[in-house]
Image (cartoon, grey):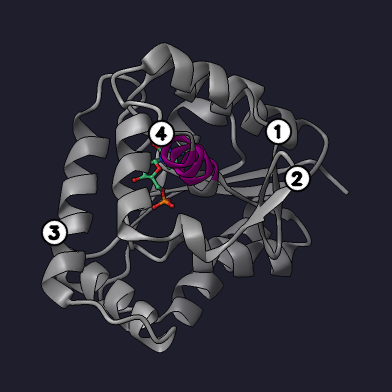
Amino acid sequence: MKKFQVAIDGPAGAGKSTVARRLADKLGAVYVDTGAMYRAIAWRVLQDGIELMNEKKISSLAEALTITLDTDGVYVDGLKLTDEIRSNQVSLLASDIAKIAGVRKALVKKQQLISQSQAVVMDGRDIGTHVLPHADVKIFLTASIEARAQRRYQELRAKGESTQLEVIHKEIADRDENDRKRTFAPLRQAEDALFVETTSLTIEEVTEMIFQLCRNKL
Ligand code: C5P
């Protein structure tokens, strides 16, 4: 199989992971959820009780941990993590540790390594700008904050979690601000990325649109 690269970036809750996973299936590529890698480090930081200020220790942890992405979850040194990395607490901490240059360096290296040997659809915040600057297709996926909060809210409710729309709205707004304003590899659209506004589109429509684009380009 040709080792093509599709990069999908955008703010929290824009539907990147659902679209990227479906697209990878349709294209016969591997889906790489880079957010899950930042979340996995955040989860370990909480487990080990490491202070956020201890950037050196967190960076060493990011370098040392073996992180494997699979269809059923993320494995950290062989331990499978699923729902535990999706809590509000882990989301916000992931966004905080994602500001640390050493953490980004370690994870970007792992992400680039994964894409060397296989065709990938990779989603995150800095894929088109930093991780895969020569990706064959680059997409910047976004939607209004109201739509993104509403989608995340429905998703959690469907899983049976009790949560409030306002809490989700604030968590997403805080993470967006963190991700856009950080010094290293902030969230921004790559110059050669296609901007896709999904507020009034369904997941199926977005996936199909990007799939057709990939078929023409790959
Ligand atoms: O994509 P997801 O919401 O799971 O990502 C969790 C957090 O990880 C984001 O809010 C962001 O701070 C960080 N992240 C990042 N760069 C990526 C992927 C995720 O900084 N490529």
Distance Cα–Cα, label 2 vs label 4: 20 Å
Q: Amino acid at mark 4?
A: Gly
Q: Earlier in the sequence, mark 1 or mark 4?
A: 4
Q: Amino acid at mark 2?
A: Gly
Classify mark 4: residues with Cα within 10 Å, few (<14), some (14-19) or many (20+): few
For this view, does 192 lie left or right of residue 81?
left
* 57, above or below 90, in the image: above
Q: Which residue is mark 3?
A: 170
Q: Which residue is mark 2?
A: 78
Q: Which residue is mark 1?
A: 66
Report the span colored magenta.
Answer: 37-47
Check whether the beta carbons of the residues at disc 1 and disc 2 lie within 8 A of each other.
yes
Distance Cα–Cα, label 3 vs label 1: 32 Å
Distance Cα–Cα, label 3 vs label 2: 33 Å
Q: Amino acid at mark 1?
A: Thr
Q: Earlier in the sequence, mark 3 or mark 4?
A: 4
Q: Which residue is mark 4?
A: 49
Q: Earlier in the sequence, mark 2 or mark 4?
A: 4
State the residue in front, 86 or 19: 86
Rendering quadrant holding ligand 1: top left
Residue 8 drawn at (x, y percent): 48, 49
Q: Nearer the viewer, mark 3 or mark 4?
A: 4
Q: Earlier in the sequence, mark 3 or mark 2?
A: 2
